Image (cartoon, rainbow, N blue to C red):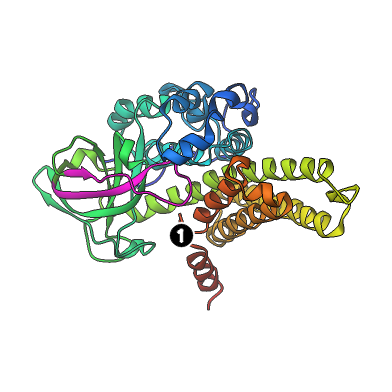
């Protein structure tokens, strides 16, 4: 097999441009017809911490999973910023943040890098199932001891003839308990940016073991678990890109992981603000709507500022990434701004709803639990600030 190139083969694959080809559809409203199905029995699913397969079928029917992929694989051919628009709309429509997070992971974990860097053979074989949502995907990057330190990944892949033998393990892998396909980021060389490579592996491969789902604070319908590898033999033809191109692929993917998952977050913040405004107008105390009290109205005003600030960062950074410009600082700042705004506005909503907000039935406390995760996954807020400081020369 001819090795896949170590850079995207096209610029209009939904991972590099802003417009793509699907200009006749309002991608923001894709999920709207399926709102009732997506939002059914939210408390029950959250309490059980189970992946809602029936709702996944609604996600599939909505077309969300097809947005950034080429039509020849069943996709819509939309660009990066249009994909962000679709995910924002999904976040606005769907109150199951865990389901949204799993859907975003489905798009970015394997489909995006496979389309951009994979061989034609692998793309033809796997992308149609990924785009349809029939093959659930996950990417295995984080390790128990290394966390966000991707340059020091310790899981190894050693060349043995036409195969690689992989040993090690990954932790906190979203979608792992339900995934059919995994993209593994492993070490094939010395520590540093040129020592990583990426492999596509099917769930039933001998030597790959998926752990039991881990119970967690929020995003409880999005399952995650540990994944371990012992003598996992992977054909060299399953490598994505050249040997040593893993850091390039990881950088490509992580930019889009942040932009996609936090576009979902923006939609969730929009819905939260609208709900708070309605409540502040209708809830009366001391003979007045509580929104007439300055303590409440200023808090709502700050929520509006937070939403629009998040939108501005996402819009500008998405455009910069789509144009192929250096956006390392912008992505780190966007991730920090949006994740922390989400957590802050969720807590504001609890305060404005008062005792009702503290009850599980209202769903506001679930927003808080979900929002905390955003300041941790895809690199903690502290890691993002370290990156920004480093890029400023500190």
Q: Is residue 17 left or right of residue 157?
A: right
Between 53 and 143, which is closer to the camera in this rendering? 53
The residue sitting at the front extreme is: 286
Q: Quadrant of residue 152?
A: bottom left
x, y (%) of residue 241?
30, 45
Identify residue for label 1. Answer: 379
Q: Quadrant of residue 91?
A: top right
On whether residue 168 falls in the magenta region, the answer is no
x, y (%) of residue 191?
27, 66
The image shows residue 95, relative to residue 321, as above or below, that is above
Mark 1 Cα-neighbour bin, 10 Å: few <14, some 14–19, many ≥20: many
* Residue located at (90% from left, 48% from top): 288
* Residue located at (61% from left, 46% from top): 359
Res 174 seen here: yes
On whether residue 220 falls in the magenta region, the answer is yes
* Residue located at (63% from left, 41% from top): 362
The image shows residue 321, relative to residue 380, as above or below, that is above
Between 269 and 393, which is closer to the camera in this rendering? 269
Q: What residue span does the magenta drawing correspond to?
A: 208-231
Q: Is residue 152 left or right of residue 327?
A: left
Between 61 and 352, which is closer to the camera in this rendering? 352
Work out which quarter of the rendered image holds the N terminus and state it: top left
Res 245 seen here: no
Q: How many marks?
A: 1
x, y (%) of residue 21?
57, 27
x, y (%) of residue 254?
45, 51
The image shows residue 110, relative to residue 339, as above or below, that is above
The residue sitting at the right extreme is: 287
The residue sitting at the bottom extreme is: 394
């Amino acid at each position: 097999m001819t090795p896949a190139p170590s850079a995207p083969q096209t610029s209009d694959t939904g991972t590099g441009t802003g417009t793509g080809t699907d200009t006749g559809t309002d991608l923001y409203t894709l999920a709207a017809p399926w709102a009732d199905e997506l939002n059914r029995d939210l408390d029950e699913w959250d309490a059980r911490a189970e992946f809602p397969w029936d709702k996944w079928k609604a996600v599939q029917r909505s077309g969300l999973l097809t947005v950034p992929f080429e039509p020849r694989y069943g996709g819509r051919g939309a660009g990066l910023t249009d994909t962000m628009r679709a995910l924002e709309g999904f976040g606005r429509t769907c109150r199951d943040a865990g389901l949204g997070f799993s859907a975003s992971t489905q798009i970015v974990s394997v489909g995006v890098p496979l389309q951009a860097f994979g061989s034609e053979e692998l793309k033809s074989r796997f992308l149609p199932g990924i785009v349809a949502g029939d093959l659930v995907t996950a990417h295995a990057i984080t390790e128990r001891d290394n966390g966000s330190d991707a340059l020091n990944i310790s899981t190894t892949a050693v060349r043995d003839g036409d195969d690689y033998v992989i040993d090690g393990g990954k932790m906190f892998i979203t979608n792992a308990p339900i995934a059919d396909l995994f993209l593994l980021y492993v070490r094939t060389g010395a520590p540093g940016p040129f020592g990583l490579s990426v492999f596509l592996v099917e769930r039933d491969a001998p030597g790959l073991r998926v752990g039991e789902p881990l119970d967690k604070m929020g995003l409880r319908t999005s399952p995650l678990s540990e994944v371990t590898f012992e003598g996992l033999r992977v054909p060299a033809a399953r490598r994505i890109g050249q040997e040593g191109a893993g850091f390039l692929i990881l950088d490509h993917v992580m930019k889009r992981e942040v932009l996609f998952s936090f576009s979902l977050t923006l939609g969730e913040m929009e819905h939260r603000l609208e709900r708070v405004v309605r409540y502040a107008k209708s809830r009366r105390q001391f003979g007045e709507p509580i929104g007439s009290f300055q303590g409440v109205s200023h808090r709502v005003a700050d929520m509006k500022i937070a939403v629009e600030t998040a939108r501005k960062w996402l819009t500008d950074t998405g455009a910069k990434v789509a144009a192929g410009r250096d956006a390392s600082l912008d992505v780190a700042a966007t991730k920090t701004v949006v994740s922390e705004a989400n957590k802050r506005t969720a807590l504001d909503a609890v305060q404005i709803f008062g005792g009702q907000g503290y009850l599980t039935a209202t769903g506001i406390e679930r927003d808080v639990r979900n929002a905390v995760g955003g300041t941790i996954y895809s690199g903690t807020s502290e890691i993002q600030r370290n990156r920004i400081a480093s890029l400023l020369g500190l």
